[in-house]
Image: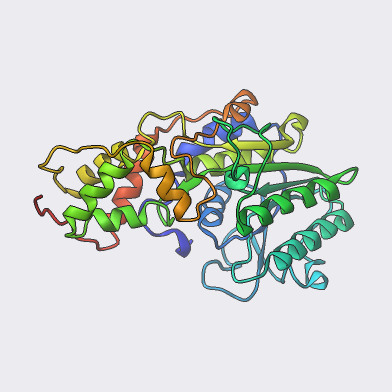
Amino acid sequence: MGAFDNAGILSIKTLSSQVHASMSKTPSCIAITGATSFIGQHLIRYLSSLQEIEMRLLIHSRQPYYSERDSGLTLIQGDLLKPETLSGFLAPDCLVIHLAYLNGVSDGGNLEAAANLAEACIEAHVKKLVHCSTAVVAGKTSDNPVTEETTCEPGNLYEFTKYRMELLFAQKAKDHFDLAILRPTAVFGPGGKNLLKLSDDLTSSNRILNYLKSCLFDHRCMNLVSVTHVVKALVFLAAVEAKQNSGIFIVSDDEQPLNNYRDIEKCLMQAFGVPDYRLPRVPFPQFLLPVLLKLAGRSNTRPFRTYCADKLRKAGLQYTDSFETDLTSFADWYKKRGKDSVTGKL
């Protein structure tokens, strides 16, 4: 498919063996919202490799990302804010993967969209809804690590809206369809926005500012998770025969030793051909960063907070690709975007 010709997009071979082993039955029809999103493109890339699967993509217009000429794709023009347009989107016993979040729409608009989708799922008698939420719904909690049992304390409108969407789906699903909620941490990978600013900074000439940021952030947790792992988790939870794969699940790579600012910075600098700082790094006092985060109005002011993904692993999901490999894939994609490495000295 033309939308996936860019280098670095999800490797099908990497995913197939693990996901097929985890799924007791692959559904014949999968309805997907947010198909043109970052995660959506990677997800459809994988699902397109499976045989005998019909994918119904809810789109607002005939967009160039996908074509009905692509095998297994059915494009349904519709709008989550217009429930009358959703009637042809869903089918009895189909699986629904909900990735859409309406940017530029009020919190009430996103809740309305979620309610419309849930009602459409009930009317169509779908089998399961897999809703992609976010781990930051934990908000201001003091728990560390954050788990699925953590009491959420949303600290801003986005977190509050995403949390209310979870509650809405949970209420609507009762006695009607199975529900799995996936909470990813900061998703990165080819085509994604996370790590773009850091990469831009490292390949710019402002070495002094980069040095100061490195001293400030030092080994703070980055809470990154590879998009390949998110896609694996979505498809794993879509195993419609596996009743245990219902509920809330966190997907993160926080257990990886490299998942901190300084080590990721070093990996990217090496990938971009940028030499390390000549001056020895002098980490700032640890109390300073939380103060700055609070002054900046951040919900999470705990720079060493981690998110635990043990529940998902105990359910049976396993990964074979390494965090460092996925980081290298992102760096390779970034370099192919035409960014030039700068090797100034400090």
| In front of the other: 80 or 30 | 80
State which quadrant residue 88 falls in: bottom right
Whether residue 82 is visible: yes
Horizontally, residue 83 falls left or right of residue 152, namely right
Horizontally, residue 136 falls left or right of residue 282, namely right
Residue 246: percent from the left, percent from the top? 74, 36
| In front of the other: 205 or 213 | 213
State which quadrant residue 316 falls in: top right
Residue 217: percent from the left, percent from the top? 33, 43
Whether residue 50 is visible: no
From this view, report whether residue 19 is shown above or below residue 161.
Answer: above
From this view, report whether residue 313 is shown above or below residue 342.
Answer: above
- Residue for point 73% across, 48% down: 166
Residue 26: percent from the left, percent from the top? 69, 40
Residue located farthest toward the top when viewing the structure as drawn: 314
- Residue for point 54% across, 49% down: 299
| In front of the other: 307 or 245 | 307
Horizontally, residue 252 falls left or right of residue 51, namely left
Horizontally, residue 323 falls left or right of residue 163, namely left
State which quadrant residue 150 falls in: top right
Residue 83: percent from the left, percent from the top? 81, 69
Judging from the image, the colouring scheme is rainbow
